[in-house]
Amino acid sequence: MEKILDVKNLNVDFSTYNGTVHAIRGVDFHLNSGETLAIVGESGSGKSVTVRTVLQLMAKNAKITQGEIRYHDEDLLKKSEKQMDDIRGNKISMIFQDPMTSLDPTMTIGKQVAEPLLIHNKVSKADALKRAEEVLRLVGIPNPKARMKDYPHQFSGGQRQRIVIAIAIVNYPEILIADEPTTALDVTVQAQIIDLLKELQQKIGTSIIFITHDLGVVAGIADRVAVMYAGKLVEYGNVDEIFYDPQHPYTWGLLDSMPTLDTDDQNRLNSIPGTPPNLLNPPKGDAFAPRNAYAMEIDEEEQPPFFKVSKTHYAATWLLHPDAPKVEPPKSIQQRFEKYQQMLGGSVK
Amino acid sequence: MTKYILRRILYLFLTLFIIASITFFLMKMLPGTPFTNQNRLSPEQLAIVKAQYGLDQPVFIQYLRYMGGLFQGNLGTSFQFNNEPVTQLIGQRLAPSMQIGAQAMIVGTVLGILLGAVAAIRKNTWVDTLATFISILGLSIPSFVLAVLLQFYLAYKWQIYPVALWDNFQSSVLPTLALAALPLGNVARFMRTEMVDVMSSDYIELAKSKGNSNWQVVTKHALRNSLIPVVTIIGPMAVSVMTGSMVVENIFSIPGIGEQFVKSITTNDYPTIMGLTIFYSFLLILVILIVDILYGLIDPRIRLGNGGKE
């Protein structure tokens, strides 16, 4: 599979009144053509900053101190502002989190959807509006022709998110970055939006980076998953590998705090104790160590490198070091391992 | 929409009626009569004059008479200014004040919006500091100080404009500038605050993610949204600027209305006080109505009628 986007050793700092916050501390990931990569992590783990860096839509006080973002053999970080304008909304576009505040309240939605077409293509206004209407139909806005002249406040939250999606896909981008597109929506609407994204991916063949903190959503849409914690990736792999063969204690914690169909009133949902570290002064060792029941002495001393679990699955935990003691993951995780063995067995047959 | 406007116009007259009534009784509580300053009339003569103007009647009867005249569009005649009808008195003096006021509002608003927008876009840079400095100057320098400074440099020293004259457009430039400072400062400060808010909003980020250049983001999305609240302060400000500034009119010898109002109060010129108050109130309420209609045009969320399709 072709790597359409390759992010290498990305480091982003924010200068604040209290000092420099090291928000992203050496993130590597890539996106294959046509796939959906989910980046999961709790609030403040740096997932939004990471993808905003791809489009260079960061806050003014953010600074990329190191790294490379290769898109088709070109480093996006070396592009001028003008060159980035040509890429944004055209080759790479973004779906935002809050549909209630993401649309210009004083512009008709027809114009808002047509805008990226007019910016990036030599089309007439009439053609652009016509095309906008088609795309609005594609994302499931009923009676788009009549509703083109309506304003955002005349739509419900779910419909507005469909409009935000229409804006993002109107130029058939190669990469679609979805920054928690379902977080602000209620659960039934969430499912509809996920289905819509999957359907659109089929139709226009775009690759998706999907940011979320909701593992349930991930299972429904992702091909691969990257787990982020305190400005670093801690584990990445195929969706089955992350869900059924997780290796990092943080991933265990995330999965253990998620209800499944097997959850009954006997097993309580667990939460990960503590809070993420302050990235003004990132810890010397593993940032997760203070919250990690499986932490070893070396976790305080040295940051774990990525250990290979399979060709596609890597985890940054000292537990995978050959010299590390064998530990018992939580019971729910062990059940996942068992299921994984059955699944592997099943696929062999 | 038409129904809404008609209803608002009805309210306009109702409000005017209430204002006229309150003003009438308040005015009657002012000490003295319109004639105390006149060349020492004998008590008999005073009684005759009072009777002539109906001032010997009880206040309530006077009120009914005045309101009766008001409903017929009659504002009475001035006690002081050669028995001129008040409508004529206002009419003549209003034009210069309105012209200077309108010019000052246009200059002040346009420059204020630009200044505020630039300050917001270049937030926390020297441009922002400079713009803030200018707008605070505009707000804090009294118009008469500015008027005298303008007069000294532009008229006396460099002789670009006439010192004090009411003649052609040339002669209106200096008073316009003197009056424009306040709306400029006000609008600039308001605009900056609004635009800083707007520029950090989600839809601006989305606009940027569409591939708009920074300039396009500002002109296509940020300006219009920032203008919405600014429109609300422009209305009342326009009224206060356009109804004349006594000081500036005095400095530039403009036959405006500002001076008239003050004179009419000090001399108890009842019909002129009433006429000017009613006229000012009318203008203010009308402008607020216009602002409300404009507001709807700029901001679709508060547009009336066919909205609310949800």
Image (cartoon, rainbow, N blue to C red):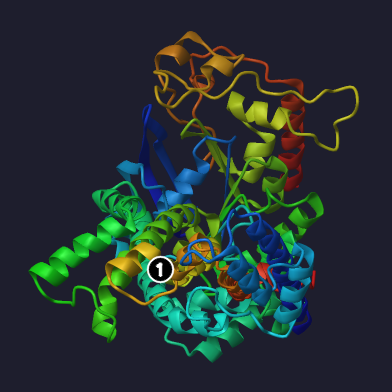
Residue at screen point 45% across, 84% down: B92
Relative to the observer, which residue lies in front, B280 or B241? B280
Q: Determine which quarter of the picture holds residue A290.
A: top right
For the question of whether residue B124 can be seen, the reply is yes
- Pinpoint the chain carrying mark 1: B
Q: Position of residue B113 (x, y in %)?
A: 40, 65
Q: Which residue carries the number 1 mark?
A: B109
Relative to the observer, which residue lies in front, A216 or B60? B60
Check the image and report above or below for A344 versus B23.
above
Disc 1, SS: helix
For the question of whether residue A205 can be seen, the reply is no
- Residue furthest toward the left? B157
Residue at screen point 25% across, 80% down: B171
Q: Amino acid at mark 1?
A: Thr
- Residue furthest toward the top? A297
Q: Determine which quarter of the picture holds residue A258.
A: top right
Check the image and report above or below for A253 versus B175.
above
Q: Position of residue B50 (x, y in %)?
A: 64, 70
Relative to the observer, which residue lies in front, A258 or B237? B237
Q: Determine which quarter of the picture holds residue A22.
A: top left
Is residue A160 found left or right of A168 in the rendered image?
Answer: right
Residue at screen point 68% across, 52% down: A182
Is residue A298 found left or right of A95 in the rendered image?
Answer: left
